[in-house]
Image (cartoon, grey):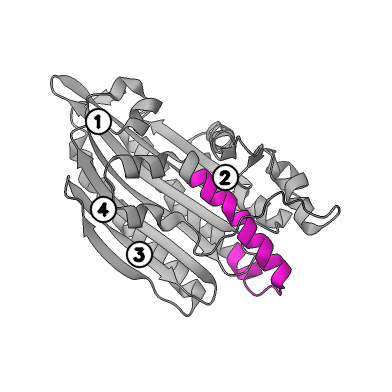
């Protein structure tokens, strides 16, 4: 679907996204109870800018970053045209909020969320616009009840728009956040969608808002349950090892990271998603029957988590 006047909607989307950044930062800062977000406002020479907010050294969160950006330019980056070749030669206008949270406690999952709006234009042709986004959960020592809550919240956010959305976007998430070279999912999934412009702007925008607003209700109950769990150096070392998978995915596969780097975005803000500490270990294999082995055997594969309800 195309529209000749997508720019008229841009201000409303930007207003929502900046409010979303504020509300998420306030909720995370309150949950941490110690550290505060530091804001770094920046301008992009080629057009646009943003506000990067990072909390580090917290009581709960080792590092949490919540970015708002609005960037534009004369040529769509290669990462976007590889996904949609018909957009080659168009200018772009993109805004979004993206966040990644790396907790201290290995029993607390890492998590990521993003919501975004794109406009692609070319003189003499109708403008093309779309929404995208989602959120996913990457536990190290998972609890089924947490995974079920995560997916229940995701499903509830999409139910007003139709029963077909959750299974479709859940499947898309499982397929997108998949490390092909490892043969495993990045975590236990959630939602992922892109290229959304049907059945029109208002409903597409409403769905994107619903996903963005569902993140805190999905994540903070897990934080409250697990933030004080007792752990040892063994669990910490496994957390640092598994964070390496996060780095691998973001640098090899993630469209947002590639788009940001290829569009001349601000490198510090783009790579804010990386964990503050991480380690690699050659040939690591979890001990049979261990909690670490359970992650591989039970959780790092696509499945219907809501079948476990009740």
x, y (%) of residue 126? 20, 22
Contact (Cβ within 8 Å) of mark 2 with mark 1: no
**Residue drawn at the location 49% of the way across and 54% of the way down:** 215
Please name which of the two marks, 2 or 4, marks the residue nearer to the observer: 2
Q: Position of residue 160 (x, y in %)?
A: 49, 40
Q: Residue furthest right?
A: 289
Q: Could you tell me if the residues under marks 1 and 3 are in contact, i.e. CB atoms within 8 Å?
A: no
| Residue that carries the numbered disc 2 in the rendered image | 190
Residue positioned most to the bottom: 34
Mark 4 against mark 3, which lies toward the viewer?
3
Residue 120 got which mark?
Answer: 1
Q: Residues within 10 Å of mark 1 (few under 14, many from 20)?
A: many
Q: Is residue 140 visible?
A: yes
* CA distance separating discs 2 and 4: 25 Å
Residue at point 22% right, 27% down? 90
Majority secondary structure of magenta residues = helix
Of the image marks 1 and 3, the number of the one nearer the N terminus: 3
Mark-to-mark CA distance, 4 and 3: 17 Å
x then y, percent, for residue 148? 67, 50
Q: Is residue 81 magenta?
A: no
Q: Please, what secondary structure does the residue beneath circle 1 have?
A: strand
Magenta region: 222-250
Mark 2 or mark 4, which has the lower sequence index? Answer: 4
Pointer 4 residue: 15
Q: CA distance from mark 1 to mark 4?
A: 20 Å
Which mark is on residue 53? 3
Taking the view exactly as shown, the residue that stands out farthest to the front is 282
Q: Label 2 vs label 1: CA separation? A: 28 Å
């Amino acid at each position: 679907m195309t529209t000749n006047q997508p720019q008229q909607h841009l201000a409303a989307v930007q207003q929502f996204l900046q409010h979303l950044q504020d509300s998420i930062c306030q909720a995370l800062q309150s949950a941490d109870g110690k550290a505060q977000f530091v804001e770094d406002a920046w301008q992009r020479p080629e057009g646009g800018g943003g506000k990067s907010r990072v909390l580090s050294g917290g009581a709960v969160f080792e590092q949490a970053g919540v970015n708002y950006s609005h960037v534009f330019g004369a040529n769509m980056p290669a990462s976007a045209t590889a996904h949609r070749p018909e957009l080659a030669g168009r200018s772009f206008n993109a805004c979004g909020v993206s966040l990644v949270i790396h907790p201290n406690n290995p029993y607390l999952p890492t998590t990521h969320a993003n919501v975004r709006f794109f406009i692609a234009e070319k003189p003499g042709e109708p403008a093309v616009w779309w929404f995208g986004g989602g959120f996913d959960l990457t536990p190290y020592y998972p609890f089924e009840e947490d995974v079920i809550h995560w997916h229940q919240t995701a499903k509830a956010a999409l139910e007003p728009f139709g029963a077909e959305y959750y299974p479709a976007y859940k499947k898309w998430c499982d397929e997108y956040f998949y490390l092909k070279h490892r043969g495993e999912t990045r975590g236990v999934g959630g939602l992922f969608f892109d290229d959304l412009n049907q059945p029109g702007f208002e409903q597409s925008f409403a769905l994107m808002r619903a996903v963005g607003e569902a993140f805190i209700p999905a994540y903070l109950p897990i934080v409250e349950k697990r933030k004080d769990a007792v752990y040892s150096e063994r669990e910490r070392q496994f957390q640092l090892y598994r964070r390496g998978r996060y780095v691998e995915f973001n640098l090899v596969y993630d469209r947002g990271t590639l788009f940001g780097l290829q569009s001349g975005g601000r490198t510090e803000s783009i790579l804010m998603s990386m964990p503050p500490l991480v380690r690699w270990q050659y040939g690591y294999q979890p001990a049979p029957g261990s909690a670490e082995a359970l992650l591989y055997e039970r959780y790092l594969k696509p499945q219907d988590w809501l079948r476990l309800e009740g």
